[in-house]
Image: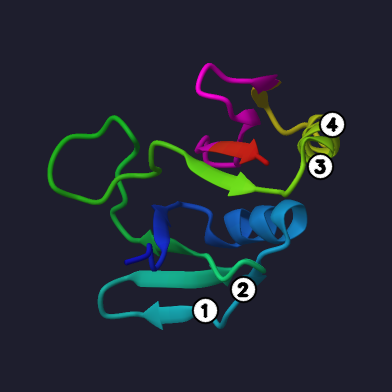
């Protein structure tokens, strides 16, 4: 078995799409729109074959809202960039571009070499080898 895709709710569909295209080389497919449900989404594909779905819907709650409506975000998304040097380079680029760097680059207790940044919605992105 394998993970087919990870999905994130967002209020800024185009902004989040641009972030993942610009810094992580994702390629967006066509935008899907369902006006009856107030729903829009993009599937982003990475060179490894992994996919990320970005979704927006009317009535989206923030991360601390109440009730049954969809919420923004997820715990974290880990993206492998292939080497410790690339982790360092990409983290430095993101920092220069004003992207919040939460941690690292560093070696974690379980052996990962990673940094952690926040995407425009505040989702934690682990950049790892």
Say whether disc 4 or disc 2 marks the residue closer to the N-terminus: 2
Which quadrant: the N terminus?
A: bottom left
87 horizontally vs 70: left or right = right
Say whether disc 3 or disc 4 marks the residue closer to the N-terminus: 3
Residue 27: quarter of image: bottom right
Residue 31 is tagged as: 1
Residue 28 is tagged as: 2
Report the colour scheme.
rainbow
Mark 4 is surrounded, within 10 Å at the Cα level, by few (under 14), some (14 to 19) or many (20 or more) other residues, namely some
Residue 86 is tagged as: 3
97 horizontally vs 80: left or right = right
Considering every residue shown, the one lying at the far top of the view is 109
> Residue at label 4?
92
- Looking at the rendering, the stretch of residues picked out in magenta corresponds to 106-124
Q: CA distance from mark 3 to mark 2?
A: 23 Å
Residue at horizontal 67%, vertical 69%? 47
């Amino acid at each position: 078995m394998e993970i087919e895709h990870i999905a994130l709710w967002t209020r800024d569909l185009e902004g989040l799409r641009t972030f993942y295209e610009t810094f992580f080389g994702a390629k967006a497919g066509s935008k899907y729109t369902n006006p009856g449900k107030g729903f829009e989404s993009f599937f982003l594909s990475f060179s490894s074959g992994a996919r990320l779905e970005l979704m927006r819907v009317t009535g989206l709650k923030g991360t601390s809202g109440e009730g049954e409506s969809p919420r923004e975000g997820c715990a974290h998304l880990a993206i492998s960039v292939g080497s410790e040097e690339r982790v360092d380079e990409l983290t430095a680029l993101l920092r220069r571009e004003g992207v919040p760097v939460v941690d690292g680059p560093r070696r974690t207790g379980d052996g990962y070499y990673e940094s952690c940044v926040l995407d425009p919605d505040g989702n934690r992105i682990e950049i790892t080898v």
